[in-house]
Amino acid sequence: MCEASAYLLMKSGDEELLLADVDLVEPQDDGQIRLVSIYGDQKVVKAEIKSMSLVNHRMVFVEP
């Protein structure tokens, strides 16, 4: 399986899980990012990619 979990890095330094088992990361025209899981769950967030480690199945986003 190649899905990853997406986290939002908070200003406190803590990470909040946005969505697990993410299959699709799609930038939107309005600066948001659409995440879709293998189960069809979706989340749209106003964020930027901080880091991605596909080997570790992990993506971290930050608010702009």
Image: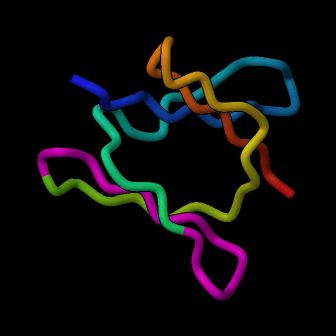
State yes or no: residue 6 in magenta. no
Q: Kindly give the residue lying farthest to the bottom in the view shown.
A: 29
> Is 7 placed left or right of 47 in the picture?
left
The residue under the point 49% across, 66% down is 26
Furthest-left residue in this view = 39
- Residue 37 image position (x, y, % from top left): 26, 47
> Which quarter of the figure is the N terminus placed in?
top left
- Residue 29 lies, with reference to residue 21, above or below; the image says below
Residue at 69% from the left image edge and 41% from the top image edge: 61
In the drawing, does residue 13 fall left or right of residue 57? right
Q: Quadrant of the C terminus?
A: bottom right
- Indicate the quadrant where residue 13 lies: top right
**Residue 2 appears at what percent x and percent y?**
30, 27
Residue at horizontal 72 percent and vertical 76 percent from the top:
31
Magenta residues (range): 27-39
Q: At which x and y percent is residue 14?
A: 73, 18
Q: How is the image coloured?
A: rainbow
From the viewer's side, name the closer residue of 40 and 2. 2
Q: Position of residue 62 (x, y in %)?
A: 77, 43
Q: Is residue 37 magenta?
A: yes
- Image quadrant of residue 43? bottom left
In front of the other: 33 or 46: 33
Left or right of 9 in this view: 59: left
